[in-house]
C-alpha cells in the first residue's frame, strides 16, 4: 500500500468522524496529493472522530491504534508517515 492509499484511509476515518473541513475539495485534494499536512490543531478531532479514525485505520490497514495513540501525532501527514513505517516493519 502506497502513501496515497494510506492518506485515503485517513480521509475516510476523518469523514466518518465528521471532522469539519475534511469535505472541502481543496483541503482533501491537497492532503491526498501530499502537499498538506492537515494539522490536527486546525481540525476539531473530538473523541468520536478519534475513535472513527482508529476504526478506519484498523479496517483499512490492519494496524490497531487507540485514540490515545493518535495524540502522539500533530498532523494527519505525520500520522500517515508513521502508519507507512508500521506497515513496512
Image: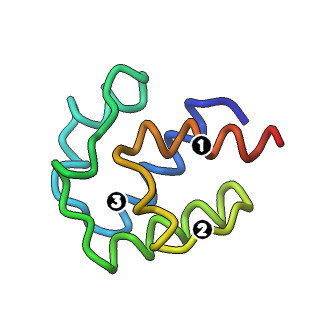
User: Is the residue 27 above or below the residue 9 in the image?
Assistant: above
Q: Position of residue 32 (x, y in %)?
A: 42, 31
Q: Which dot, 2 or 3, sits closer to the camera?
A: 2
Front residue of 32/68: it is 68
Answer left or right for 4 relative to 11. right
| Image-quadrant location for residue 50 | bottom left
Q: Position of residue 8 (x, y in %)?
A: 50, 43
Image disc number at residue 65? 2
Residue indicated by mark 1: 82
Mark 2 to mark 3: distance in Å?
A: 18 Å
**SS of the residue under disc 1:** helix
Q: Residues within 10 Å of mark 3 (few under 14, many from 20)?
A: some
Image disc number at residue 15? 3
Q: Residue at x 35, y 44 (%)?
A: 75
Q: How many marks?
A: 3
| Image-quadrant location for residue 44 | bottom left
**SS of the residue under disc 3:** helix
User: Is the residue 5 above or below the residue 34 in the image?
Assistant: below
Quadrant of the frame with the N terminus: top right
Mark 1 to mark 2: distance in Å?
A: 11 Å
Nearer the N terminus, badge 2 or badge 3? 3
- The reply to whether discs 2 and 3 touch (Cβ–Cβ < 8 Å) is no
User: Is the residue 42 above or below the residue 53 in the image?
Assistant: above
Q: Position of residue 14 (x, y in %)?
A: 36, 58
Front residue of 38/16: it is 38
Answer left or right for 63 relative to 42. right
Quadrant of the frame with the C terminus: top right
Nearer the N terminus, badge 3 or badge 1? 3
Nearer the N terminus, badge 1 or badge 2? 2
Q: Position of residue 35 (x, y in %)?
A: 35, 20
Mark 3 to mark 1: distance in Å?
A: 20 Å
Q: Residue at x 24, y 61 (%)?
A: 19
Amino acid at each position: 500500500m502506497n502513501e496515497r492509499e494510506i492518506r485515503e484511509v485517513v480521509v475516510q476515518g476523518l469523514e466518518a468522524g465528521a471532522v469539519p473541513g475534511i469535505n472541502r475539495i481543496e483541503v482533501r485534494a491537497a492532503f491526498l496529493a501530499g502537499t498538506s499536512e492537515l494539522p490536527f490543531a486546525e481540525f476539531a478531532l473530538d473523541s468520536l472522530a478519534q475513535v472513527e479514525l482508529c476504526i478506519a485505520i484498523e479496517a483499512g490497514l490492519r494496524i490497531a491504534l487507540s485514540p490515545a495513540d493518535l495524540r502522539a501525532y500533530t498532523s494527519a501527514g505525520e500520522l500517515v508517515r508513521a502508519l507507512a513505517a508500521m506497515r513496512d516493519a
